[in-house]
């Protein structure tokens, strides 16, 4: 008997990810869940250089600013609660130093441009269609930074708004890197602070816009990975959520990663990934007797494994 529904998963026949691949990951915090796995297995990747970006307009703005060589100045930032912030970036970039924030924004913008130019795969995770428009400038922000809500208008992006934004994202990327595979996914994290019905409406807008884009034949090498559907349809039980009942727990993240690996990671590197896994577990091993001869031999063996792997894949560094 089968006690759950399971999505039909088709392995990619081409454009699969291996240790020669270079990835850029942008979007919702679910990007960081997948990014942690890529980091663990030592894939070349850059994750959210402007921090978590929840909605497509924020991702579009980052890509546009990066490719058009925008230079951030003091006009683009503001101070509140003894911290300098930028409405284009997540609060993890915020700083007590005005100059440090400006420098970080410009550095990460250049890194984004470089990464788009060289990426073989770009993963874009959309979290919500709800956005906040800063009334003073009439612009949609990436993050409100706890500025009083009365200074914003909350708006639900229409399907057409999102579609145009995604179209701009793809065209901008393909303008400098026509070979990159762009993988869209919708975050399985529920934004229930917006409201339960409102969250469902938001996800529906995102899904409709993405699939409208993918239906266009001229957008070659654009794909969809069903992380949202896996969570909603295969893992439809609260035992797969964290205590907040909103975010997927580690079991769910591992399951979705394994599916992503089946679809997108080349089988030719499975043995290498196993070697990386052995080394990573060895690095995390906590000995009972750190000075013992047995542990010293273990460390020597671990260093030999690192060196052997690095000789085959110079980009793999522990």
Image: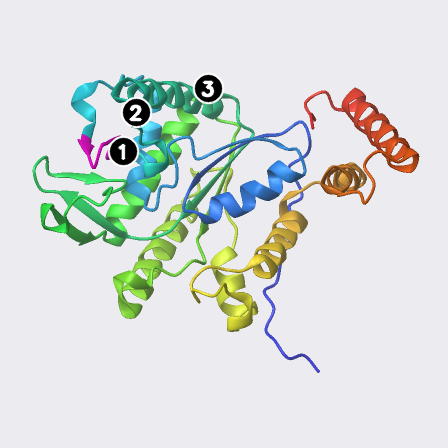
Disc 3 designates what residue? 114
At a point 61% along the width and 50% down the height, the residue shown is 260
Residue 56 x, y percent position in the rendering: 32, 43
The stretch in magenta equals 79-87
Residue 314 x, y percent position in the rendering: 72, 20
Residue contact between numbered discs 2 and 3, judged by CB atoms under 8 Å: no
Disc 1 designates what residue? 88
Is 250 placed above or below 238 here? above
Compare marks 2 and 3 and give the one earlier in the sequence: 2
SS assignment at label 1: loop
Disc 2 designates what residue? 65
Q: Distance between the residues labelled 2 and 1?
A: 10 Å
Left or right of residue 41: residue 223: left
User: Of circles 2 and 1, which is in front?
Assistant: 1
Q: Residue 140 carries which label?
A: none
Left or right of residue 257: residue 24: left
Residue contact between numbered discs 2 and 1, judged by CB atoms under 8 Å: yes
Compare marks 3 and 1 and give the one earlier in the sequence: 1
- Is 90 one of the magenta-colored residues? no
Residue 72 x, y percent position in the rendering: 25, 19
Q: How far apart are marks 3 and 1 (CA)?
A: 19 Å
Quick one: 164 or 5, which is closer to the camera? 5
At a point 30% along the width and 69% down the height, the residue shown is 196
Residue 229 x, y percent position in the rendering: 49, 62
Quick one: 193 or 82, which is closer to the camera? 82
Q: How far apart are marks 2 and 3 (CA)?
A: 13 Å
Quadrant (top left, top right, bottom left, bottom right) of the N terminus: bottom right
SS assignment at label 2: helix
């Amino acid at each position: 008997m089968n006690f759950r529904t399971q999505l039909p998963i088709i392995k990619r026949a081409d454009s699969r990810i291996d240790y020669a691949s270079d990835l850029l990951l942008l979007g919702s915090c679910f990007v960081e869940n997948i990014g942690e796995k890529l980091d663990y297995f030592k894939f070349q990747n850059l994750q959210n250089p402007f921090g978590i970006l929840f909605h497509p307009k924020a991702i579009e703005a980052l890509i546009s600013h990066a490719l058009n060589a925008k230079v951030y100045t003091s006009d683009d930032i503001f101070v509140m609660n003894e911290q300098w912030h930028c409405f284009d970036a997540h609060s993890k970039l915020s700083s007590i130093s005005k100059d440090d924030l400006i420098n970080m924004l410009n550095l990460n913008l250049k890194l984004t441009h470089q990464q788009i130019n060289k990426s073989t795969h770009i993963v874009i995770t959309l979290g919500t269609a709800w956005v906040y428009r800063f009334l003073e400038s009439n612009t949609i922000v990436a993050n409100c930074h706890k500025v009083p809500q009365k200074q914003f208008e909350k708006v639900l992006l229409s399907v057409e708004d999102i579609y145009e934004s995604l179209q701009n994202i793809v065209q901008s990327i393909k303008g400098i890197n026509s070979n990159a595979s762009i993988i869209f996914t919708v975050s399985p994290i529920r934004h229930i602070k917006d409201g339960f019905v409102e969250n469902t409406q938001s996800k529906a807008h995102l899904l409709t816009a993405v699939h409208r884009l993918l239906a266009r034949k001229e957008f070659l090498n654009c794909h969809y990975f069903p992380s949202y559907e896996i969570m909603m349809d295969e893992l439809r039980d609260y035992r797969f959520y964290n205590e907040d009942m909103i975010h997927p727990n580690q079991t769910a993240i591992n399951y979705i990663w394994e599916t992503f690996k089946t679809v997108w990671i080349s089988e030719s590197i499975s043995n290498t990934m196993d070697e990386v896994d052995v080394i990573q577990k060895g690095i995390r091993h906590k000995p009972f007797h750190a000075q013992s001869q047995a542990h010293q031999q273990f460390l020597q063996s671990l260093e030999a494994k690192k060196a052997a792997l690095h000789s085959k894949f110079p980009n793999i560094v522990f």
